[in-house]
Image: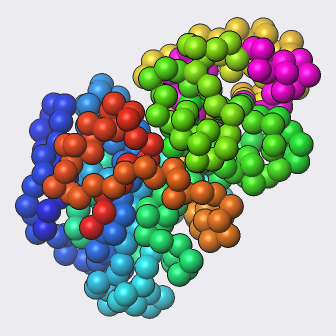
Amino acid sequence: MKAVAKMRREPGLDVIEIEPDTISENEVLLRMRAASICGSDLGFYNYTPAYQRFAKVPTIMGHEFAGEITETGKNVRDFVIGDRVSVESVLYCGKCKFCRSGTTNICQNFTVFGMHRNGAFAEYVAVDQKYLHRIPKEISFLEAGVVEPLSVVVNAFEDVAAPIRTGDTACVIGPGPLGLFSAEVLRSKGVRDLLILGIDMDEYRLQLARDKLSHEALSTESADPTERKNLITEGYGFDAVVVSAGSPAALKSAIPLASKGGQIIVIGIFPEDVSLPASDLVRRQISLRGSYGSAWKHYEEAIRLLKHKLVRAEAIVSHQFSLDQGEEAFQMAKAKTGSKIQFKN
Ligand SMILES: [Zn+2]
Ligand SMILES: [Zn+2]
């Protein structure tokens, strides 16, 4: 089969021919139908120091995926050949304190598909049945291929953030797929006054947010967000500020945008440490919350949101590529001239 893999300890990727992994008794073999490129895949592609430490080479990349079951191991009872499924990205131990309390996303001993074991940018992938979520017929494979990133946003708003109320104001910094999914989920919770911020390089994504999702979106390099903030929030600042961009400047800019008593929810991953005006956070009673990954129930909620068209994933997935076009797909992800980019098979 064809696969997009990290074969060398240097920036780049290889499109390879390889036999599919053989399945164990608790696993199924999936024919991949949609697998999305994540910011972390790009970090692995670029082979930044963080990923030199974190990920394993050689590995087939990809952890955000959906497919169709083509083979089942002998202990698999709940799924049959032909079932359509989305897959969890974090492989958890099931034994540590966090797994036992249901927060498998912060498992003490976790590994990730496409980083530590063969992932989804391949024609076929072997998956343990415990990571499978059934996809109803109302959801296309394109949509099923973003259940994972959407579930990350669901975790942030359902379990990490203080409750979001109808009529709250919100600002999303970073118009990448996680930012756009955040805006969609906030909207589904009754947030109407919402501002998406990016930089000039994000123009494609800002435009997409405006044209296809009808959100207000602007570049902070071309317009001053303070004026918009004051107008939207009557000078108070936003009740919730989401930082989905992994840039230190984005996180710093969140503090003056937040209301007194408000919250900043951080889902971006940063390449370096960030210094913050801590006393300002304290005196204005702003809470800063980090949110990472997602667990079983967040996948189920993401599937529900997609099923009822409460999140417009078809607008957020901008391009699909074949596995042969691995390099081209990653070049586009790097240049940010698309939004969510997927492989299909
Ligand atoms: Zn991801
Ligand atoms: Zn664990």
Horizontally, residue 34 falls left or right of residue 189, namely left
Q: Which residue is found at the position 12% from the left and 38% from the top?
A: 8
The image quadrant where one finds the C terminus is: bottom left
Let me know if residue 236 is in the magenta part.
Answer: yes
Q: Extreme left residue here? A: 17
In the depicted structure, whether residue 286 falls above or below residue 207? above
Number of numbered callouts drawn: 0
**Residue 38 sits above or below residue 80 on the image:** above
**Picture layout, residue 286 above or below residue 74:** above
The residue shown at (37%, 87%) is: 82
Residue 55, by quadrant, is top left
Residue nearest the observer in this picture, 307 or 122: 307
User: Is residue 171 inside the magenta stretch?
Assistant: no
Look at the image and give the residue range highlighted in magenta. 226-251
Residue 141 x %, y %: 43, 69
**Residue name at image x 62 percent, y 25 percent:** 218
Question: In terms of image quadrants, where is residue 332?
Answer: top left
Whether residue 318 is visible, yes or no, is: yes
Picture coordinates of residue 98, whole percent (x, y)? 60, 53
Residue 31 at x, y percent in the picture: 29, 74
Q: Image check: 243 left or right of 279?
A: left
Q: Quadrant of residue 21?
A: bottom left
**The N terminus: image quadrant:** bottom left
Q: In the visual, does 157 lie left or right of 234?
A: left
Q: Position of residue 65 (x, y in %)?
A: 40, 62
Q: Is residue 329 above or below residue 144?
A: above
